[in-house]
Image: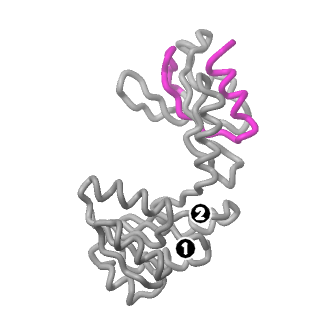
Amino acid sequence: MYVIIIGCGGTGAALAKHLINEEHEIVIVEKDEKRAKELAESMDALIINGDGSNPEILGDAGIEKADAVVVLTKDDNTNLTICQIVKKFETTRIVSRVNDQSKQDLYLGLEITAAISPIAAVVSYFKNAITQGTSKSVASISKGKAEIVETKMSNEELDGKKIKDVDMPAGSMICLISRNGDVIIASPEEILKKNDLLTVVTKTEASKDVSTILKGK
């Protein structure tokens, strides 16, 4: 893949190294001259010192042939502007960092591939570590008001029940079932089986109750 990374701090550099190791072609656009020089001395990639919101700089980076663009500056207004510009080039994948979670909806409104909040991701990792053995939070969504949760259904009382007959907490929904390597899109008539891995979308306030119901006492 031909990948352009715009804004290359610690996260961008780590991502670039991983992609380079996997033999992807990487171009980095970095506005800070000193940082760009450091990257050029340590990275096997094309480094362009310039403003990623400038279409001419994007042209120099090869935007027209890019398979993916990753926007990682520390300013949301800059990231949003760059995403809007990149969309005009019909790039297949656009992924952006979200610095302020309150602005996540602005990114989603652009219909880019993904808008990732490092804070939300870290919170999910810590939560999973603390609650290991219960449910796993895959992602925090809607500014932290909801979560996508994975949990193994170990409540024997639910074994053989249809989803519509499970008394799920208000604001939660079973969306996906993983069973013996197969993926099943959940429907009200779908029958649950013990040890199914369930993907649930739930309001954050109800996530603990979801785990309690699906795992049992």
Q: Nearer the viewer, residue 114 or 7?
A: 7
The three-letter amino acid code for the residue at tag 1 is Asn
| Numbered badge on residue 172 | none
In this view, 140 is above or below 127: below
**Is residue 199 one of those drawn in magenta?**
yes
User: What element does badge 1 sit on?
Assistant: helix
Q: CA distance from mark 1 to mark 2?
A: 8 Å
Toward the bottom, the furthest residue is 56
In this view, 136 is above or below 67: above
| Numbered badge on residue 98 | 2
Question: Image check: 180 left or right of 172?
Answer: left
Residue 169's image quarter?
top right
**Is residue 193 one of those drawn in magenta?**
yes
Toward the top, the furthest residue is 156
User: How far from the left and from the top, in percent, is residue 181?
Assistant: 35, 26
Residue 103's image quarter?
bottom right
At 72% from the left and 27% from the top, the residue drawn is: 209
The three-letter amino acid code for the residue at tag 2 is Val
Label pair 1/2, CB-CB below 8 angstroms: yes
User: How far from the left and from the top, in percent, is residue 4?
Assistant: 36, 70
- Quarter of the image for the C terminus: give it: top right
Circle 1 is placed at which residue position? 79
In this view, 22 is above or below 194: below
The magenta-colored residue range is 189-217
Q: Residues within 10 Å of mark 1 (few under 14, many from 20)?
A: many
User: What element does badge 2 sit on?
Assistant: loop
User: How far from the left and from the top, in percent, is residue 102?
Assistant: 70, 63
Q: Residues within 10 Å of mark 2 (few under 14, many from 20)?
A: many
At 55% from the left and 20% from the top, the residue drawn is: 153
